[in-house]
Image (cartoon, grey):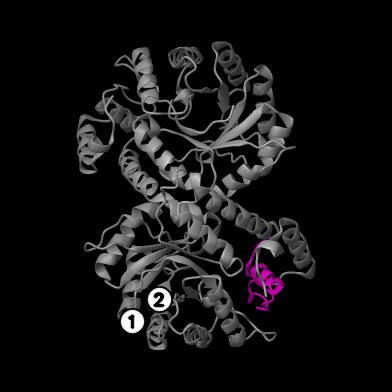
Amino acid sequence: MWLTGITPAFLTPFGEDGEINYKVVRDMVEFHIANGVAGEYVGGSTGEGFLLTEEERCKLAETVIDQVKGRVPVIIQVGALTTAEASRLGAHAEKAGADAISSVPPFYFNVGLEGVKAHYAAITAACNLPMYIYNIPGATGVNVSPALCKEIVEQSPRVVGMKFTSYNFFEMRQLIDLDIDGKKLNIVSGPDELLVAAQAMGAHGAIGSTYNVLPKLFVDAYDAFNAGDVKKASELQGLGNQAIQTFLSFQSISALKEMMTLIGLDCGSGRRPQRPLTGEEKEILKGRLDEIGFFDFAVMA
Amino acid sequence: MTWLTGIMPALLTPFDAEGNVNTAMARELVEFQLTQGITGFYVCGGTGEGILQTEEERRLMTETVVDQVKGRVPVISHIGAITTAAAARLAAHAKEAGADGISSVPPFYFSVGFEGVKGHYAEIGAASDLPIYIYNVPHATGVNVTPTMLKDMCEAIPTIAGMKFTSYNFFEMRQIIDLEIRGKKLNIVSGPDELMVAAQAMGAHGAIGTFYNVMPQLFVDAYTAFSAGEVKKATELQARANSVIGAYFGIGGGISAIKAMMKMLGFDCGAGRPPNPPLSEEKVEQLKATLTDLGFFDFVPGR
């Protein structure tokens, strides 16, 4: 398992009743694959994994895996408040046919370095899939530093890489350069707004929210960058960033879902406590997207 | 009109054994850096310990560098100071001395609010018609000059030409690059040496930083490779530089550690000025051993 390219952090579409809309899940998979994505990352922050029931998380994983049918790797984010639930979701992901799992470190409770290590040890003991640590200090309050990461990998050899969601690319580079008894880690970057910057620092791929709605633009930026067309890559990144700035000025997951709806994939709203957009906000969002040329550079589903 | 590109050292201010500015060594540094392909000098900034020097010393450093460079590359004099009056006097002096641009941190220590920041730059702009590069280094000053603040100030102060952007928030850097003021773009140079190629990928026009004193050629090569589309090579060179920067942080960092590295390369720049602590002999040896392991003395030409 070695992830490269652009992988959407899969949005979980909800119907008007607030339940997962599995028809749109399947349509999104097809839209993403048609636009060149390299994988699907399911049930992460963007996917509101922590706001879904365990049963919903299992069925969502099964549906994506069934629809993808092995065309690209599927990674299931199994992180949860309790180590027990994360372990159960890990075991389920393996049974369901996922290619890898991923997990945030323990959050809310400050369990210390040993607590973090024990959490990953338990999850990786519950299933045989490769594990990507999901490091997102801005959300969890825990930074998995290069030194801590090394210790985790030494203790839990199924850890193969990290989704790195922080602006500290100096640390990201140290993670890329880690050598753990001859083993290199597979590092994918998290901040979509810095995709080409992360590529310049040597990240192997990228997983993020905006790749749901603008898969082709970011695949093109990634390809241009790696072909040495750095000007084109930077220009595409600039366009992508205008879209990112736009949805960040609203309740972001609800706004991103509204953008999906506008390109033809009805994703509903974010689940509470995330606020849905008001009718007026939807109009303002659409107006801003018009101004930045979103409907010209986005691919419709 | 000055438009900075390429790799520019935030020039160290060398001190002699008595702690005075060593102008002879400053001239030698200038000549060494120029042979390595650097494209400008940034004098008396954070690395140059500008705010720890007297006004007289700062004027001497600016005059010395301008005189030695003789127009071969642009010289930007950092004139930021804790009082607006000192900054304005130094701005006027930089113009007389023949500098190509000035730069200033926003007011620090006292929280003066946005109007205070804007007033500070307005007085600097009134004291000199040189292009102003705002030096945004929020972790040191406690003030982040946001894209919105910058746009507002540029509209009021026509000589603001750009920014030295020393933060990891390249999302904001890109917003600043994309700003348009009276139909013109600002000239944005990145500050974090350890992310130089990342900043280039985001569209920064050039880079000013500390480690370009120590490894000018390596960074010039990385910059050139990146601009030519040789991204793999650029990334590898950045990673090599970062191993050195990691060794520097590993012993605690600081200006005296940079100066110790310069001494290892044959340029005795003295120690950092207090409150910058000196580097103990033991730490110097430790640093030297780590650098040797990293192959530093093979890939960095000294003299």
Q: What residue type is labelled 1?
A: Ser
Query: How many other residues sit within 10 Å of disc 2, few (<14), some (14-19) or many (≥20)?
Result: many
Residue holding disc 2: B102
Q: As rendered, which of A50 and A24 lies closer to the eye?
A: A24
| Label 2 secondary element | strand
Q: Is residue A180 left or right of residue B78?
A: right
Q: Is residue A227 part of the magenta span, yes or no?
A: no
Query: Measuring 34% from the left and 78% from the top, which residue is drawn there?
Result: B130
Q: Earlier in the sequence, mark 1 or mark 2?
A: 2
Q: Is residue A81 visible?
A: no
Residue holding disc 1: B128
Magenta: predominant secondary structure element?
loop
Residue B203 location, quadrant? bottom left
Q: Is residue A251 left or right of residue A208?
A: left
Find the distance from the CA under tag 1 to the CA under tag 2.
Answer: 9 Å
Q: What stretch is highlighted in magenta?
A: B252-277
Q: What residue type is labelled 2?
A: Ile
Q: As rendered, which of B192 and B239 lies closer to the eye?
A: B239
